Each structure stands twice: as structure tokens, then as C-alpha cells.
């Protein structure tokens, strides 16, 4: 296999190895096989055009055209001429797919479904990166800069996915890049022959030493570099998800149109509660006068991993005409059916549809899907709540305290799923739950005592400005500090309920809102809320309200029951929104002009997804800052090494007669290395005089620089062959004169290459190889001497 063919193969392999970091982002991963096939065709086109050969720009253009035709064949065959020639319709279709893919990326959580838009973005992205890597490494024979597109591909994927397998994707990407570098080095060395090595290791010139094998050395250095890269991150602390953090999604397949995945719906509640102006999110009219329990539920969070609550993976299907009876709701529980007409604001874009719970029927236009476990609706194909109007038929369930207290045990499957508690949860959570509920005779009494502990007698304070902490200890910190807002209270109560064996989850949505003069209800940003839902067999999922001064306490938790203290339970709150906090709000620094443009981050908080704790430790900030600086520094290491080496070689030390040979040869080596950096490869077989003439000829040096090169060559011959070598004055000045002349004659691209990626930096690998060889020889000699030592002889 020729050198270019090998480079082509390695460049494609490096791209695919870096692209492996994209695998966790989408399911299924069948797109990767398509990317492999198309990238192989793209690389083959490049290999053929270079074999013709075509000019470099034409080679790149041919590959780009082939890539476009391949993408057209796969994604826009019906809109293209002859099935693969792109025309206006094909470009329009590809643009629509990209737009759909962009929307899907913004809506879906990881792993997202493999929609056509996402598939085009993944395969197209891999092909674009592959074209860039092939162009740099093979067409322009410069593998080092090819690491930049590979780094971009890996960084985007790793930044989105994260997870415990991030080290594996880094290992693959780094291995691919090192393989590409070694392949380029091997190809270059195969064309050089014997490389002029400059100064000998002693004052004599050892011509029999031969050329060091840098490919073998590169492998050793690569192994060491990968080992360091994998070991160092283990010593750095990971950014753990906070009490409000975590990303998650429900992923499922439905019978009505493939798969769909919904983003984590946990909204930025703190920003919403702290807004200066309480903007209206939606308004509604209902045919019941009792609206205190009209919580507008967006979605339930039922997967608890110890650091965050998030939606579990669920099957999602077409919206049924009539929803089935809510799970667990018995016929003897009192209920009433109500009708509610809801209008969402034009600016409010939410994937999940806010509705009263439990819903029996929804009349809405647009593309929506139904998740049966949570009884929620989620938008499909870019559908959201912006400006939608819909009518909901729902139930008001009114269980009695006796029914809840006498509820039998739920099914084993339901209890197993909704009482899962991770091992990382601090023991203080379960200990506090048992202490608070001591003396209870059933789960209902335990639930009421937990609610009272947070809302009434536990000493907790409602505070939207608090920063509780991060990681698995966040709930423990909240129980200690006793400050937080609805998310903290609901998360903590649901977690504690699970430790007691009560099925629990967290609901996110809005409190009922405020009545208006026209009879409607207005729901604003400050009505954003989260609350726990606990399951009781015969009643179903039941709302509790542990957050003090928020929403309304359900009536079934205020009834005097055995073991309960009804006097301690607060009456229903008449206000459904908290007063503005006196502390500085998250939008306090928003400029007036931003407010006019509705560009304040907190104003659209409910349209965002995910929520995390802002209390990042300073040590983590420092470590990640240092890591970022290190990433910026690594590409500059060859330049910094050459600058340091040039300073040492041309420095003022070692100017005595005894140092004349070493100093002269070091100066000459600096000149040949500089010429090498500008593309004039050294030739060890030539004498210094012929090497100087070659540098003058290939470097197009003028008279002054030419004389300087020849003076340096004469000085080298003098110290090599004269009986008594003497120091020649002005060597450093001549070397700098030659360097300036070579830089002045070079193009801007060649000058940048010589500065940022000097070819002579390969001497680092050679030096490491020589050191390793010498060390191996010493160790081998030591072992041989030990083996030859007579038995019984002491050391």
C-alpha cells in the first residue's frame, strides 16, 4: 500500500473513531453504518483524484461534489435529477430536513430518536469532518492541523452526552489522531532517506549511528500520552448534578408514527418565581367554582437517580379520543367531571401541554402524542404550546381521609418501580423520614406527617434565592439548612416517601392562578410550581403540598384521623402566587432595552428545559479553567519548544574555545532545522558546504543571507576537521539573518506552518527514542550481569 493510500485509510479511520462519541446521542445507531459506507466512498473519490493527479483545489472540490451527491442520493433521491444530481427541489428538501433536525435536537433529550433530520445532521457532519481531515492530512500532507476538526467533532459529542463512557470515546478519538500522525511521519520519513542529524553526541561525527525509528518511538509516546490523558481526569472532581439538575427524557415508541422523545421538562422555576414582572403564561375558563385544586400539571418526574428527578422512559402513542380510567382510581371514590378551556400565551413555548389532572379527554389541534403512565401530552414534529387553544375534560377526585388510610398495598410491579431509591442517597434522608413519621399506622398518616414536617412544624423557610448544593448530598443539605422553594420541598418529600415504601413521583406545572374580573383565571410565571404525588391503591396518584405558603393544602390531608394532628395543618391558601422576593432577582440586571425586546433570560424560563444548582464550588471552577487553558496550550507546544530550543542554541553561554565545536554545530543545526520548518528537508549525506548551497537554492536566498549560510558551513567544517577548533565570531547573528530571510521568502501559509507546527519538532520523538534505547540497553546489561554472577556471590 502506498503512503498516500495509507494516509487516506488512516484519515477515514480517525474520523470514524472520533465520530463514535456521537453514538450515545441517538438510538438506534444504524446511522453509523451509513456514515461508514458514505465516508469510504468519499475517501475513495479523494484517492482516485489524487492518483490522476488533479490539483489540490480540484481534488477538494471533487470530494465535496461527491459528498453532496451522496447525501442527495440518500436523503433527497425523489427530489433529485436521476436520483443523485441535486437541483433546487433537492436543496429545498435538504434544507427542510436540516431545519427539522435542528428542531428535534432542541426538543429531544439524549438519546434522541433517529429522525430523518437528525440522521442527516449526524451523517452530514461526519462527512464534512471527514472531508476536512482528508484534505488537511492527505491532500495537503499536514496531519497535525487535522486534529482540529477531529477535536471539534469529539468535543460537541462529548459535551452533549457525558456519562461514564466518556473516557472510551476520548480513547478512540485520541488513538485515531495519533495513528494519523504516525502514518504521516512514516510516509514522510520513507521519502527523506537519511536525515542530517547535526551535532554528534561527542566531538567526533558518528556517521554510523543511522536514523532512529520515530514510528516505533511515536507508538511509545502515544501510549504514554493516552495513559496520562486517561489517568489525569480520574483525579479531577466530576461536576455532579444538583438537586435541580439532571437531564433526562422519556423515550418511547408509539403505534401512530414511530418514536418520540421528550426533553426534560423540569423548568427553571427559581428564575420564573423571581421575575420582576409576572407575565401571563395562559388563561382558562372552567365550569367549576372550586378552583383551588385546579393545578395545571405539565408532566411527572418519576425516575430518581439520587441527584435528580426526571421523566422515565415511556411508550408514547396517539392521543386517544377518551382517556382510560386513571390507574388505581376505585369506583367508590367521589369525583366530578369538569370542562376547562385553556389559551396559552403567544410567547410561551412548552413541549408539554399543561392540563388539570386527571384528564379524561382533550380537544386540541396540532401534532401531539400521549404518554399513558403520566397521562400527559407532548408535542411532536416541533409542536409546542405557543398560542394554542384547547379544551380539556378532567376529573376532580375527592377521596376521604379514611379511604386513603385504608388503602391496600399497591401491586408489586408498581411499588417496585416507584419506590426505587439509589444507594447514593444519604442515609440521613431515610433516617429523617422514619423519625418524622414515627408512630404512624399506615402510609397515609406517614404522608400527612411528612407534609406537615415541611409545611408547618419542621422549621423550613420558603426562599427562592437559596443555593442548596449539588450532587447526591443536595437533599441532605436541604434538610440541614431548611431553606428552599417548591422544587426542594417536592423532591425531598418524594424521596423520603420512597424510603418509607410509599410510591412517589414529582409533578411540575402551575398552581391554579388568580381570578379575573371577566370570570377567567390568569396563570403567570410566578405560579410555576412543583409538588409530590403519592400513590394510594383505590385512589390513584394523589397530590400533596409540602411547600409552605404556596398553592393549597388538599382537604383530604386536613381531616382529623387517628395519629394525625389536624390543628397543625394550615388552611387553604387564598393566594396562589408568592410575593416578590426582597432579594435581588435573577433578572435584576436585565437592561430596559432587553425587556422591550423580551430578551431577559428569566422571562422565558418556562420555555427552557433543565434546571441546575448554580452553586459551583470554586475549586471546580479553577480546575476546569486550568483544563481549558491546557487545551489551548497543547496545540502551541511545538511552537514553544522551538522557541526555547532556538534560544538555547543561539544563547550567549558556552562561548569559550573549549565549547567551539558544540556551539558551532548547535548553531548550524538551528539553521538546518529552520530550513526544515520552511520545507527544506535536511540531507545527511551532503557535506555542510553542499547543504548550504542547497538551502540557498531552495530557499531563494539573496546575497546577504547566502553569505551567512556559507560562513556557517565553513565554521562547521573548521570545527570538524581542524586540529585545533576555534570559535568563529558572529554565528548567532548569521543564523538569525538566515532565519529572517527564509521567513521573508515564504508564503503566509508556510510561515504559519513553520511557526505553529514546525517539522523539526519530530526531534523530540527521536530524542525520546534514543533515551529509551539507551535505557533499555543499560537495563539489559544490568540483567545480563546479574544472570552471569556466580551463585552464592553477594552483591
Image: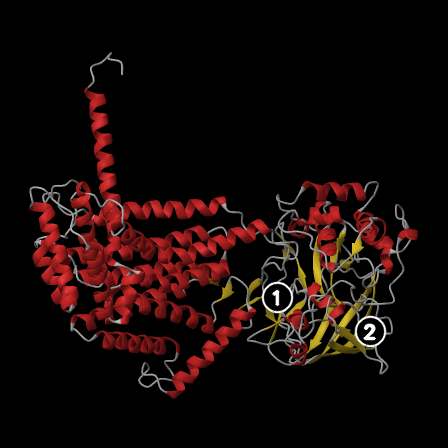
Against 130, is 302 above or below? above
Where residue 25 sits in the image (x, y, percent)?
48, 62
Toward the top, the furthest residue is 792
Foreground residue among 403 and 449: 449
Regarding residue 498, the answer to whether it shows in the image is: no
Tell me: 66 left or right of 394.
Answer: left
Foreground residue among 759 and 487: 759
Residue at 49% of width from left, 78% of height from top?
A: 99
Marks counted in the figure total 2
Against 614, is 336 above or below? below
Q: Residues within 10 Å of mark 2 (few under 14, many from 20)?
A: some
Which quarter of the picture shows residue 179?
bottom left
Against 794, is 702 above or below? below
Quadrant in which the N terminus is drawn: bottom left
Which quarter of the picture shows residue 640?
bottom left
Badge 2 marks a residue whose secondary structure is strand
* Residue that carries the numbered disc 1 in the rendered image: 609
Where residue 95 sits in the image (x, y, percent)?
44, 81
Residue 514 numbered mark, or none:
2
Q: Give yes or no for contact between labels 2 and 1 (Cβ–Cβ under 8 Å).
A: no
Which of the marked residues, 2 or 1, is nearer the chain's N terminus?
Answer: 2
Residue at 73% of width from left, 40% of height from top?
A: 431
Residue at 86% of width from left, 58% of height from top?
A: 556
Where residue 41 sits in the image (x, y, percent)?
27, 69
Regarding residue 629, the answer to whether it shows in the image is: yes
Whole-Å distance between the Cαs marked 2 and 1? 25 Å
Amino acid at each position: 500500500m502506498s503512503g498516500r493510500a495509507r494516509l487516506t485509510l488512516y484519515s477515514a479511520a480517525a474520523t470514524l473513531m472520533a465520530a463514535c462519541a456521537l453514538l450515545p446521542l441517538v438510538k438506534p445507531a444504524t446511522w453509523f453504518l451509513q456514515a461508514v459506507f458514505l465516508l469510504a466512498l468519499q475517501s475513495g473519490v479523494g484517492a482516485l483524484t489524487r492518483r490522476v493527479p488533479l490539483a489540490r483545489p480540484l481534488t477538494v472540490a471533487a470530494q465535496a461534489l461527491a459528498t453532496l451527491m451522496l447525501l442527495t442520493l440518500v436523503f433527497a433521491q425523489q427530489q433529485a435529477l436521476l436520483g443523485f444530481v441535486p437541483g433546487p427541489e433537492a436543496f429545498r428538501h435538504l434544507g427542510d430536513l436540516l431545519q427539522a433536525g435542528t428542531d428535534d435536537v432542541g426538543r429531544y433529550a439524549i438519546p434522541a430518536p433517529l429522525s430523518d433530520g437528525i440522521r442527516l445532521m449526524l451523517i452530514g457532519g461526519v462527512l464534512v469532518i471527514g472531508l476536512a481531515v482528508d484534505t488537511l492530512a492527505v491532500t495537503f500532507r499536514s496531519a497535525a492541523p487535522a486534529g482540529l476538526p477531529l477535536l471539534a467533532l469529539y468535543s460537541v459529542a462529548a459535551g452533549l452526552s457525558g456519562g461514564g463512557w466518556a473516557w472510551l470515546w476520548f480513547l478512540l478519538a485520541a488513538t485515531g489522531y495519533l495513528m494519523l500522525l504516525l502514518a504521516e511521519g512514516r510516509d514522510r520519513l520513507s521519502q527523506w532517506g537519511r536525515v542530517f542529524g547535526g551535532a554528534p553526541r561527542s566531538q567526533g561525527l558518528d556517521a554510523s549511528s543511522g536514523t532512529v525509528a520515530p514510528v516505533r518511538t511515536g507508538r511509545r509516546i502515544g501510549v504514554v500520552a493516552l495513559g496520562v490523558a486517561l489517568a489525569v481526569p480520574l483525579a479531577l472532581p466530576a461536576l455532579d448534578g444538583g438537586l435541580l439538575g439532571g437531564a433526562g427524557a422519556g423515550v418511547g415508541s408509539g403505534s401512530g408514527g414511530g418514536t418520540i422523545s421528550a426533553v426534560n421538562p423540569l423548568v427553571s422555576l427559581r428564575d420564573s418565581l423571581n421575575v420582576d414582572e409576572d407575565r401571563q403564561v395562559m388563561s382558562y375558563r372552567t365550569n367549576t367554582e372550586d378552583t383551588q385544586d385546579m393545578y395545571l400539571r405539565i408532566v411527572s418526574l418519576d425516575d430518581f437517580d439520587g441527584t435528580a428527578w426526571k421523566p422515565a422512559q415511556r411508550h408514547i402513542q396517539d392521543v386517544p379520543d377518551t382517556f382510560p380510567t386513571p390507574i388505581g382510581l376505585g369506583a367508590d371514590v367521589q369525583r366530578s367531571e369538569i370542562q376547562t378551556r385553556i389559551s396559552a400565551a403567544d410567547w410561551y413555548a412548552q413541549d408539554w401541554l399543561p392540563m388539570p389532572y386527571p384528564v379524561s379527554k382533550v380537544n386540541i389541534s396540532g401534532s401531539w402524542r400521549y404518554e399513558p403512565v403520566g397521562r400527559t401530552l407532548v408535542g411532536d414534529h416541533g409542536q409546542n404550546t405557543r398560542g394554542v387553544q384547547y379544551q380539556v375534560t378532567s376529573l376532580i377526585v375527592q377521596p376521604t381521609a379514611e379511604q386513603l388510610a385504608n388503602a391496600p398495598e399497591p401491586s408489586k410491579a408498581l411499588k417496585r418501580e416507584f419506590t426505587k431509591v439509589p444507594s447514593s442517597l444519604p442515609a440521613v434522608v431515610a433516617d429523617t423520614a422514619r423519625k418524622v413519621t414515627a408512630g404512624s399506622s399506615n402510609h397515609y398518616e406517614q404522608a400527612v406527617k411528612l407534609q406537615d414536617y415541611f409545611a408547618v412544624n419542621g422549621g423550613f423557610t420558603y426562599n427562592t434565592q437559596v443555593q442548596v448544593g449539588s450532587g447526591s448530598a443536595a437533599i441532605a443539605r436541604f434538610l440541614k439548612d431548611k431553606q428552599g422553594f417548591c422544587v426542594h420541598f417536592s423532591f425531598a418529600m418524594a424521596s423520603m416517601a420512597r424510603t418509607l415504601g410509599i410510591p412517589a413521583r414529582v409533578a411540575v406545572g402551575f398552581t391554579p392562578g388568580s381570578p379575573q374580573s371577566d370570570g377567567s383565571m390568569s396563570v403567570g410565571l410566578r405560579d410555576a410550581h412543583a409538588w409530590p404525588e403519592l400513590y394510594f391503591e383505590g385512589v390513584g396518584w394523589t397530590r400533596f403540598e409540602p411547600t409552605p405558603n404556596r398553592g393549597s393544602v388538599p382537604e383530604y390531608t386536613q381531616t382529623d384521623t387517628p395519629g394525625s394532628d389536624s390543628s397543625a395543618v394550615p388552611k387553604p391558601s387564598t393566594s396562589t402566587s408568592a410575593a416578590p422576593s426582597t432579594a435581588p432577582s435573577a433578572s435584576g440586571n436585565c437592561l430596559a432595552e432587553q425587556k422591550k425586546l423580551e430578551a431577559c433570560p428569566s422571562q422565558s424560563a418556562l420555555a427552557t428545559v433543565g434546571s441546575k444548582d448554580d452553586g459551583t464550588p470554586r475549586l471546580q471552577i479553577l480546575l476546569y479553567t486550568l483544563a481549558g487553558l491546557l487545551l489551548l496550550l497543547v496545540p502551541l507546544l511545538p511552537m514553544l519548544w522551538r522557541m526555547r530550543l532556538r534560544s538555547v542554541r543561539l544563547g550567549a553561554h558556552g562561548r569559550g574555545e573549549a565549547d567551539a565545536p558544540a556551539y558551532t554545530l548547535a548553531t548550524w543545526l538551528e539553521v538546518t532545522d529552520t530550513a526544515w520548518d520552511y520545507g527544506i528537508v535536511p540531507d545527511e549525506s551532503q557535506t555542510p558546504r553542499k547543504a548550504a548551497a542547497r538551502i540557498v537554492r531552495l530557499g531563494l536566498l539573496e546575497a546577504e543571507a547566502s553569505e551567512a549560510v556559507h560562513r556557517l558551513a565553513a565554521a562547521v567544517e573548521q570545527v570538524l576537521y581542524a586540529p585545533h577548533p576555534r570559535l568563529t565570531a558572529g554565528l548567532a547573528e548569521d543564523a538569525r539573518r538566515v532565519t529572517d530571510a527564509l521567513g521573508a521568502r515564504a508564503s503566509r501559509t508556510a510561515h504559519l506552518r513553520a511557526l505553529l507546527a514546525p517539522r523539526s519538532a519530530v526531534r523530540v520523538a527521536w530524542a525520546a527514542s534514543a533515551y529509551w534505547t539507551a535505557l533499555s540497553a543499560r537495563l539489559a546489561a544490568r540483567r545480563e550481569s546479574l544472570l552471569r554472577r556466580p551463585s552464592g556471590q553477594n552483591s
